[in-house]
Amino acid sequence: MVTWHQNDFPKSFQEYEAARALISNPEWINKNTAELDADMAEALIYYGDPKRAIQLVLNAMKLYPDHAYWLHWILARGCYQVGRYQDAIDEIGKIEAAKKPNDVRLILAASYAQLATEDEANIDEAKVDKAKEIMEEFSDIEPNWTLAKSAAYPYDSASERYHWIDGLRKAGLRPF
């Protein structure tokens, strides 16, 4: 995780493979493999391969059905990145309210904003309002978060970065 945050995705993927080889305790192999794969899926999203990320998370969920809530969070982000906005919203809905971190509101708001504007001739104002309402909730908790901070995350794919920032912009996240 540290390595991909330093924008060295190839080395990060090598480290994930090396870590996978270290998982040996039979009692924990499914849980540890599932969580490692889900963590790698997040790196794949930023790398520009959200389809592979989605498959990794789905496989992780099957491998360890008692998985942590954050696998839904990563799956939702992958769904957003491939344009499956309703699926992203539905995945966030699977996280218990008490466990939902504020960051999932970004995925929700961006997904509603993209759904609202899919048909440029018929913008769904109710979904626009929903996106803006969710973004306001996020910003009330995280008032210093901006588009610029979201864009500063390491991406290996400019189009993936643009897609994410576009949804956040449409949802009303302030630029600076």
Image (cartoon, grey):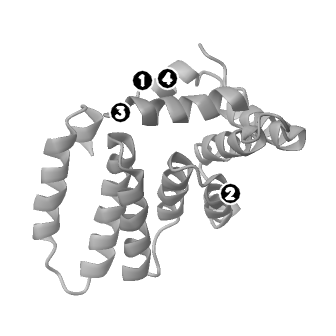
Residue at the (66%, 24%) spot, across then down: 143
Residue that protrudes farthest toward the top in the picture: 176
Q: Residues within 10 Å of mark 4 (few under 14, many from 20)?
A: few
Residue 163 placement, left or right of 6 = right
Quickly name the residue at label 4: 149
Quickly name the residue at label 2: 86
Residue 10 placement, left or right of 36 = left
Circle 2: element type:
helix
- The three-letter code of the residue at mark 2 reads Gln
Quickly name the residue at label 1: 152
Residue 138 placement, left or right of 15 = right
**Rounded to the nearest whole Å, what is the CA distance between mark 2 and mark 4?**
25 Å
**Rounded to the nearest whole Å, what is the CA distance between mark 3 and mark 1?**
8 Å
Circle 1: element type:
loop
Earlier-in-chain disc, 3 versus 4: 4
Earlier-in-chain disc, 1 versus 2: 2
Residue that protrudes farthest toward the front in the picture: 121
Q: Can the viewer see residue 64?
A: no
